[in-house]
Each structure stands twice: as structure tokens, then as C-alpha cells.
Amino acid sequence: MNKESLFLTLVAVGLIPLGITYGVHPSFNLLPISFLDEVEINSIDHANIFSGIMGLYVTMAIFWILGAFNKSLTIPALWSLVIFTTGIGLGRAISMITDGMPSNPYLLFLLLEVIFALIGLMFIKSIKSNSA
């Protein structure tokens, strides 16, 4: 397994339980992330939003795993990872400006999203320069 495939797989494996936890919270928690206990889901509409987020997280992670094992999907998977993590990170940054500072776990998520986007871009550049 090359480094790009390992990267895609590790990020996906980390994202799937988080996504599922968002979607089925608060009745079920795959991860020991107690800070989600503070999130109030008090309507069907709120639950629907979190379930939608779960679907996005899980399907993106599945695509990244496919990209890890199918060479023709590796670059599209890396691009989708970069777009996904950049989008989530920008959303968090906008929230920090408009809503204030979140708790530490969300700051850690932002840091990881920035790092993953940069690593993904590095791998894309490396693949493109090696194939030229």
C-alpha cells in the first residue's frame, strides 16, 4: 500500500465512527467523545440535519477507501478529501468569527482538517509531477 492509499484509508477509518456518532447521537456513541453530550438535538429537524451530516461523512469516507484501493480513483478521492476538509474547516473558521470560539475538541478538528487538506494537496502535486 502506497502512502496516498494509507493516508486515504486512515482518514476514512477515523471519519466513519465520527460521522456515525453525529448521525445517531445522543442515543448511541461509537467514540468516547463526551463533548457531543452537550449538543442538544431537540427536534426531528435537528436530528435530520445530523443524519444528513452522517451520510455525507460516511459516503465520503467510503469513496476515499475506494480511492485507496483503485488507482483510477486515487486522485479524485484525494481531491474530494481536500475539498471536504477545506469546506468543513472553512465552515468552522467562519463560525469562530461569527459565533465565537468553540470548545477544544472542535479546535482540534479544525487543526486536523487543515493538516489533512495540506497533506492531500501535497499528494496530488506529487502524483501529478511523477506522472508528467
Image: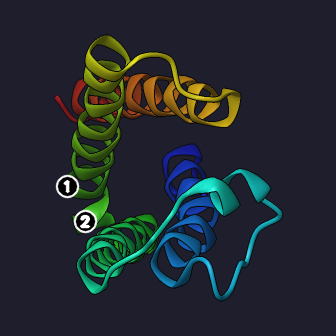
Quadrant containing the C terminus in the rendered view: top left
Q: Please state which amino acid type lies under the numbered disc 1.
A: Pro
Q: Nearer the viewer, residue 15 or 2?
A: 15
- Residue at the location (49% across, 47% down)? 4
Tell me where residue 30 appears, x and y as whole percent. Answer: 73, 78
Q: Nearer the viewer, residue 63 or 100?
A: 100
Quadrant containing the N terminus in the rendered view: bottom right
Indicate whether 88 appears above or below 20. Answer: above
- Residue at the location (36% across, 79% down)? 47
Tell me where residue 71 appears, x and y as whole percent. Answer: 32, 65
- Tell me the CA gap for discs 2 and 1: 5 Å
Would you name the residue on which mark 2 appears? 73
Give the crowd class for mark 1: few <14, some 14-19, many >=20 residues within 10 Å: some
Indicate whether 40 appears above or below 109. Answer: below
Name the quadrant containing residue 125: top left
Name the quadrant containing residue 51: bottom left
Q: Residue furthest right?
A: 32
Mark identifier at residue 84: none
